[in-house]
Amino acid sequence: MVPYFETLRVKTAGLSNLRDSKPQATPSKIQNMKTILTLLITIVTALGLDTARADDKPSTSGVPASYPLKKCVVSDEELGGEMGKPIKVIHDGVDVYLCCKSCVKDFNKAPAKFVAKVKAAQTKK
Ligand SMILES: [Zn+2]
């Protein structure tokens, strides 16, 4: 039978062996790891930003920040207000945001007139 202190010594020896057998990371290895991590973070961040840009992130009103008007060109209603999510229509290559479906009908009656309002607002900006 092994005396108690003997067992203790074996245990301690085992622990120190474990510690010694751990692969020692050399400073250059750590440096490489850091470089790779930094690169990964940079790539992830860049991708995230690209996605946000591609989506043309809508503001709280549901209209992109690049859109020059805060109101519906047909009814003069606040976009994204009580009428809900604005409706996007494209005429002559110009994005126009309208506050509701009935405005889309009115817009289609004289689209050039309403697009002119958007264009005027864009040049003012
Ligand atoms: Zn409307």
Image (cartoon, grey):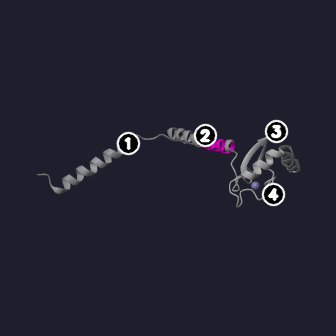
Q: Amino acid at mark 1?
A: Lys
Q: Which circle marks residue 76 in the picture?
A: 4
Q: Secondary structure at mark 4?
A: loop
Q: Mark 3, mark 1: which one is toward the viewer?
A: 3
Relative placement, left or right, of 86 versus 124 is left
Span of residues in magenta: 44-53
The residue beneath circle 2 is 43
Q: Amino acid at mark 3?
A: Asp
3D distance between C-alphas at marks 3 and 1:
68 Å
The relative height of residue 26 versus residue 75 in the rendered view (above or below) is above
Do callouts 3 and 4 mark residues in contact (Cβ within 8 Å)?
Answer: no
Q: Mark 4, mark 2: which one is toward the viewer?
A: 4
**Mark 4 or mark 3, which is nearer the start of the sequence?**
4
Q: Secondary structure at mark 2?
A: helix
Q: Amino acid at mark 2?
A: Ile
Front residue of 113/49: it is 113
Q: Mark 3, mark 2: which one is toward the viewer?
A: 3
Q: Is residue 66 visible?
A: no
Relative placement, left or right, of 79 versus 19 is right
3D distance between C-alphas at marks 3 and 2:
37 Å
3D distance between C-alphas at marks 4 and 1:
71 Å
3D distance between C-alphas at marks 2 and 1:
32 Å
**Mark 1 or mark 3, which is nearer the start of the sequence?**
1
The image position of residue 5, as x and y in percent, is 20, 56
**Mark 2 or mark 3, which is nearer the start of the sequence?**
2
The residue beneath circle 3 is 92
Which quadrant of the picture is home to ligand 1? bottom right
Q: Residue at x 81, y 51 (%)?
A: 68
- Total number of numbered labels? 4
The relative height of residue 37 versus residue 71 in the rendered view (above or below) is above
